Structures are given as structure tokens and as C-alpha cells.
Amino acid sequence: MSLAGRVVLITGATGGIGSETARLCAARGAAVVLADLNAEAGEALVGAIRVAGGQAAFVRTDVGAEADAAAMVRFAVETFGGLHASFNNAGIDTGHLSVADTPLEQWQRNLGTNLTGTFLCMKHEIAHMLAHGGGAIVNTASTSGAIATVTSADYTAAKHGVVGVTRSAAVDYSARGIRVNAVLPGGIATPMLMGALVGNDPLRRVIEASHPIGRIGEPHEVAETAAFLLSDAASFITGACIMVDGGFTTQ
């Protein structure tokens, strides 16, 4: 699954899944553009990839701001000469509340990053890809994009929206050379999840037991799926929403 000669853009690049995907794509020959709000962590990851022999560059990006999304794509093209594939992975978790308890500000913030941010990135990525022979896009949704998550109305709505915009774009653009897919992770050992589990072994055991495979997933397991979908090895896959959830949604 070589990515040699490809320019791959990754948002949310400094998190667990994003950083693993960036390292993997670079190791497979891609020039990777890392987009994130955390400039310090982004530049550190660029340095690590370069030390390992890869090509990387960082651009500070708020995916919920259209000017930033457009500038991010321009940066990729200006830095490495093109854009062949994108992993729209940026996301936030704003808390766990049911519909009646969710403040409008929290709702708007969650959807602004998780759904509108994905849409804005896709909008500008697709515009470039249409003019330059096509490409591949992978969006990070969640098992919350397939089922309802208890007391998580905003996140569930946003991730269902990511699944919807993924499928809509696949229908609209696949015949024009752009494949669009999504990964739907279950419980993954990202800094966000593991931070929430510090000192809470009972909750950790509940999450582990909720996956038929019997454990929490690792970021590299999502990265492998995303990198496959970004590569030509997945040339006949589009509109797919692939569970990387240890069997969680099969129950």
C-alpha cells in the first residue's frame, strides 16, 4: 500500500489517531501536511517524521473557520506541489449531556468543529482535486455516527452528519475521480479517552467489556484503516463507513 509520490493532508494531526496516521503515511512514502491548532505539537511531529526520513510540514488550522480550511489546502499545494489525499480527522468532545440539558453554545461548538469543520475541509479539498485529476478523502466519524450514544446529543448528531456528508460526497464525486470514505472508531486509546480514564479503573473495565474483542483499540489500528482507504489498494471502495470498533456495533 505505497503512498509514494502522494501529498496527504491530515487534520487533527497531533492527536493519537492523527499522529499515528501521519507517521504511517510518511513511512509509506507520502509527503504529509499536518494541520492542527497545536503548533508546538505539530512542529514536534514534523521534526520526528523528518528524523525518520519522511517529508512533512505543519500549518496551524482551525477547521471550523473557512478561511483556515482554504489556506490549509493552498499551503499543501504550495509546499509540496499538489494534494492527492486527505484525512479529515479533527474533532472535539464537548461533554456528555442529553438534548434538554445541552446549552446552545456547546451544541454549536461541537457541530462547528466535528461536522462543519469536516464539511469545510472537504469543500476546499474537493475543489482542488476536481481540477487536478481526482483524489481520496477519508473522514473520521465514530460509532456515535452509527448508533446513539447516551447523554451525548451534540456529538452523536455531529458524527451522524459526518457519515451523511461522506456518503453524499461519494455519490456526487466518485464518477469524477474522488473517492470518499469514513472510519468509525470505537473506544481507542487516544490521549482524550485515556485522560478521562485516569483513576477510573471501573469505567475502563466497562469500556473494555463493551467491545466483543475485549479491549480498547490502539490508534495505529485506525491509522492502518485510514491509510489503506487513502491508497490505490482501496481503488474500488467509496461511500464506505468502516467500523474500527472491536465489534462494538455488532451487538
Image: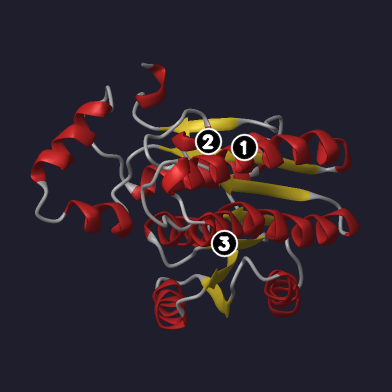
The numbered mark, 1 or 2, whose residue comes first in the sequence reads 2
The numbered mark, 3 or 2, whose residue comes first in the sequence reads 3
Residue 188 as seen in the image, left or right of residue 72: left
Distance from Cα at disc 1 to Cα at disc 3: 18 Å
Of badges 3 and 2, nearer the viewer stands 2
The numbered mark, 1 or 3, whose residue comes first in the sequence reads 3
Instruction: Tell how many labels.
Output: 3
State whether residue 148 is above or below residue 191.
Answer: above
Q: Which mark is residue 163?
A: 1
Distance from Cα at disc 1 to Cα at disc 2: 6 Å
- Confirm whether residue 163 shows in the render: yes
Residue visible at 59% across and 40% down in the picture: 182
Q: Which amino acid does the dot numbered 2 rest on? A: Gly
Q: Which amino acid does the dot numbered 3 rest on? A: Ile
Q: Nearer the viewer, residue 63 or 100?
A: 100
Label 1 secondary element: helix
Q: Are marks 1 and 3 in contact (CB under 8 Å)?
A: no
Q: Which mark is residue 10?
A: 3
